[in-house]
Amino acid sequence: MNNLTQGLINTGNQVRVLAINTPNNLVYIDEVDKGYVKSTNIEAVYIDTAIRIGAAIANLFTDKSYNIERFISGDFDRKLVEVLKNDEYDIVQLESLFVAPYLDTIRKYSKAKIVLRSHNVEFEIWQRRSATCKNPLKKAYLSLLTSRLKKYEINHLNKYDAIACITTRDMEIQKKLGSAVPMTDIPVGVDEIKAPIVEITEPISLFHLGSMDWMPNLEAIEWFLNHVWGDIKKALPEIRLNLAGKSMPQWLMNTTDPNIETMGHVKDAKQYMNNNGIMIVPLLSGSGMRVKIIEGMALGKVIISTAIGAEGIEYEHGKDIFIADTPSEFVEAIVACSRDMELCKTVGHNAKELVRDKYDNIVISQKLIEFYKSIS
């Protein structure tokens, strides 16, 4: 969201940001960059989206999506009315399905075109989690959440004036589900990294960077540690694994494995990535597009990801990224990279070129503006 906001501003557009502040993603506006605050007039409304056992149980006796219900707030609705009354807008861009409950308010108080910036096919994330879940009771509950979220997502597909998907795949899925409004696929963009690539040094280290309160990330690391890590250490006894991201669980922070280093939130993600070796993205569920992969590519990092993790990226396996979907494929890719520094160098440079050609933030922002002009 921040990348796109900056891109729109840098291409000469006026942008106003109204955000939802949640317990897991709490931002204090007075700590945000002053220039950003001035250029976006950003405000945030706190909504307690924490999962409550009582509320979750009560929700079972309704037909509503608990995923969506947690984002409905009278305070946010009132602030939205205030914002819409104070200024006129050409476009109101909804960042994800979770602000769709405010469609009626926007229609009532604004003549702007409403565009969903579709980050994912949201129900697909839960569908994939349900498919991999082994606990029968949890699996049944995840299936119920998936069914209700899917129904909500489909029912709202034609309530927007247009949809801007992050990936071509997501756009095609939503068309098949019944979307008949104007649609486009415009990926995540990053600002071009002009600094030279920080080359990998020996011995090679692995790293993962991601918010651990997003369940697909936690699931991915658990799978990697349980099914891949042991075989990698046998093949490469000195290899190190660095794990970082906010909401790091205590069991990972307290690990006794001497080859693993864990930390929480990192202030400078680019510096953290530059200080480490190969990025692993062992996602088993999720949807949309992983910004961290694009950011890592822009820095010339070698990335080993599952096919699900790399969805939406125009990659070529073995050229600008390595795709590994099984434990043996992960081990094979990591061992191959550890023994061939020239291979790492080539793949890293190819990754950077891919970002330069396909994911430049200014170019992507301009494409989005052209799409908006076409629906006005």
Image (cartoon, rainbow, N blue to C red):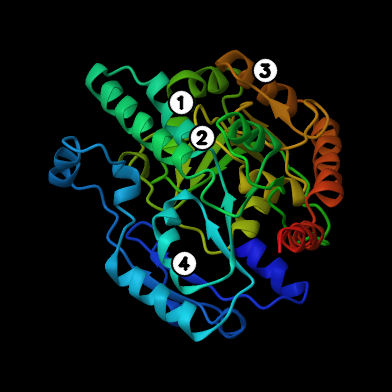
Q: How many marks?
A: 4
Q: Callout 3: few (<14), some (14-19), or many (20+) C-alpha neighbours within 10 Å? A: some
Q: Of discs 3 and 1, which sits in the foreground? A: 1
Mark 3 or mark 2: name the one nearer the start of the chain: 2
Is the Cβ of the residue at disc 3 closer than 8 Å to that at disc 4?
no
Of marks 4 and 1, which one's residue comes earlier in the chain?
A: 4
**Residue at the spot of label 2:** 286
**Between disc 1 and disc 2, whose residue precedes?**
1
Residue 345 lies in what quarter of the image? Answer: top right
Q: Which residue is mark 3?
A: 332
Q: CA distance from mark 1 to mark 2?
A: 7 Å
Q: Amino acid at mark 4?
A: Ile
Mark sitting on residue 106: 4
Q: Tell me the number on the disc at residue 128.
A: 1
Q: Is residue 41 above or below residue 327?
A: below
Which residue is found at the position 27% from the left and 60% from the top? Answer: 48
User: x and y percent of residue 71 in the render?
Assistant: 34, 56
- The answer to whether the residue labelled 1 contacts the one labelled 2, judged by CB atoms less than 8 Å apart, is yes
